[in-house]
Image (cartoon, rainbow, N blue to C red):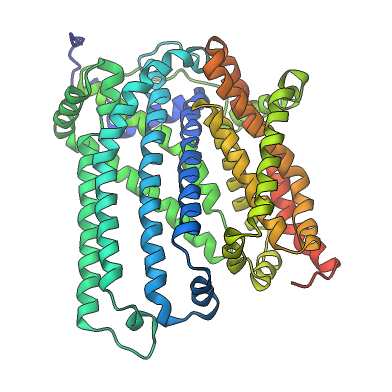
Amino acid sequence: MEIPQHSYLSRKSKKGVFELLSIAIGFLKNRPALSIPALISLGPSIVQNTLFVLAFLYMVENVFEIDILKEIVKEGEIGLIPELLRYISVFIRFYAIAFILGRILSKAFYSTFFYPYAYKLLKGEESDFFIEVRNFLRYFGKMLKAALVIEGISIGIPVLILVYALDNFLKIMHFEEMISPKLSWSIENLVILTSLLLVIFLLAGMALIFGILFIFVYQIIVVEDLSLPTAIAKSVFLALKNIVDIAIYMVLQFILTLIIVLATLLLQLFSVQISELVYLVTGILFYPILDLVILGIYLQSINQSITAPKETVYSFTEVFLRIFNKGVAVFKNFISLENLPYLIYAVLVYLTGFILGTEYSKGPLGEIFSIFISSEKLNVAFQGAQFSLSSSIFAHNWQVSASTILSGVLTFAIPAINCFFNGVILGLMYGLIPVEIFIIGIFPHGVIELPSFLLAASSGIKLGYYIIAKREELGTVLREAVYLSIGLAPLFLIAALIESLITPQVLKIFSVKF
């Protein structure tokens, strides 16, 4: 395939990393749809969680020994540590596989929707994300292959090596020394721990190096339509050629990440829990900006010019309010006869999960959950809720809602599966805790949260149906899904405030004793 030729860019016309950063911020303000791929990339987390749940169910049936687990958790029996380590070892393997698969799918979907749209914007072309979304889908096959190779090498291999190292570490480490204040650490333990830290450091370096070398692969596939092997080779060449700009970019990314982490830790010192909220904002806002910067570096390296966004009179606050108002309007219109079949389907799936959850609570799964859901832990959970927790609760619940809606991009089965497992979890809780605690502890916020989640699930199911049966109308339905996720945010915020502020007080009023 012929590679497009581009006019040479003079050194003066090339933009530096910080100038590209300013351009990226301007584009995000002008085109908030740049954040939509980040929201869509949350969908594969449901696949990841589903795999984890299935693995957990397998462990319940084939790995866990209930009596031993009870002794470990309730009594802290040191003599049973080898059994606990065996459970941890199996858990780590399953989690690693689910993490790698989730990472691959997430990167594939993000790249499919982000880079074609971002490329058009940086070239100065007018583009409506929702109108062109069907055209973006044609990149998915290529992006999935690229993600399998790129993420498999840069993330998958280091993670699997780390799992192997941890597995052996758990077998040879003397944990009695580590957890007992009366015993000093042996030289053997210190050597083993030092070796593990060295392995982790080397694997992190390996992931970083491959991440830098493969940094342009997805962009090359979109812009130049090259085969995957050729794109990888060209990415390595361009990465080495632009190593200074990439180094500045990596330092900038590190500084932003460090600021976010330090701010989160500082607020946690004052019992302000915002980690979930920070993670959400980082994914939706910062990642698209940084990816626009790296796309700009790539385009200039192949002598393509960058078009700055047009000046806008709107501030970020005004842009947010416009989007929010549209979200509220879509939420009001979504509750209609047209969408009733999807809502009924979501309710039936959820009820099925709830009924099965109540049944599972009587078996081995219920026994395991009952070990961790003790009266004392419920008391601490309810009585310790504070206003600061509301932001974390809201961010988590809204993220689950948004990922449920946009997971419909994969297929309608994914939001349905998530709806089912949420029903199972609620059913387990209903079967394991006293009815009065369940009603008083769940109903105040659940009366808002549950209908909101079911609306989200029904929207995801609708989106998945249109992906399969009515793709020509996909843009319209995706627009509705995105704005609905925004329109549901106030309901999840209200539910979070009730859960963190009102529910503990209601429990006190009724003098519920755990």
| Above or below: residue 502 compared with residue 405 | below
Q: Which of the pair 224/75 is nearer the observer?
A: 75
Residue drawn at x 28%, y 74% as measured from the top left: 173
Residue 341 coordinates in the image, percent (x, y): 72, 23
Q: Look at the image and tell me whether residue 398 can be seen.
A: no
Locate residue 50, reporting x and y percent: 50, 43
Quarter of the figure with the C terminus: bottom right
Location of residue 341 with respect to 66 vertically, above or below: above
The residue sitting at 42% across, 29% down in the picture is: 109
Please name the residue shown 36% across and 19% down the image: 139
Q: Determine which quarter of the picture holds residue 387.
A: bottom right
Q: Position of residue 206 (x, y in %)?
A: 20, 48
Q: Position of residue 175 (x, y in %)?
A: 34, 78
Query: Total marks drawn?
Result: 0
- Work out which quarter of the rendered image holds the N terminus and state it: top left
- Residue 231, image quadrant: top left
Looking at the image, residue 173 sits to the left or right of residue 496; the answer is left
Image side of residue 467 versus residue 437, left or right: left
Q: Is residue 119 left or right of residue 270?
A: left
> Which quarter of the picture shows residue 248?
top left
Residue extending farthest right: 510
Kindly tell me whether residue 264 is visible in this rendering: yes
Looking at the image, which is closer to me, 136 or 256?
A: 136
Residue occupying the point 39% across, 24% down: 112
**On the rendered structure, is 119 left or right of 391?**
left
